Image (cartoon, grey):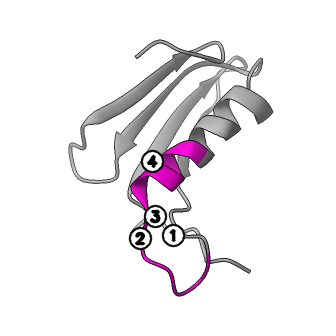
Amino acid sequence: MIANIDKTNSLTKCIVYFNDGNVHTFYSLDKKHKNSKQDKALGMRRLDKMLTGTFKAKFETAIIYDNELNGAELAKYKRGVRVN
């Protein structure tokens, strides 16, 4: 097991608004292995892969934020395509 995905340890989060009306928050996995340092770019790539691959036709909007209180918007997706 690489590491537990924990909302307090993740550097970024993604809020996904699905076509069926559900909303779900996903947290990034920022490590390659248990003892490695966190890498924000790795976590962003993994969230991007999830959105453009696994969930491509299943969501209306997805927004990736810094995982902080009032975190900045880092990326936005509409129907599987990055728009920002």
Q: Which residue is mark 1?
A: 6
- Provide the secondary structure element on which disc 4 rests: strand
Q: How many marks?
A: 4
Q: Are marks 2 and 1 in contact (CB under 8 Å)?
A: yes
- Provide the secondary structure element on which disc 2 rests: loop
Q: Which residue is mark 4?
A: 13
Q: Are marks 4 and 1 in contact (CB under 8 Å)?
A: no
Mark 1 and mark 3: span between their CA atoms? 4 Å
Mark 4 and mark 3: span between their CA atoms? 8 Å
Mark 3 and mark 2: span between their CA atoms? 6 Å
Circle number at residue 9: 2
Q: Are marks 4 and 3 in contact (CB under 8 Å)?
A: yes
On whether residue 63 falls in the magenta region, the answer is: no
Q: Are marks 1 and 3 in contact (CB under 8 Å)?
A: yes
Q: Which residue is mark 3?
A: 7
Q: Amino acid at mark 3?
A: Lys
Q: Amino acid at mark 4?
A: Lys
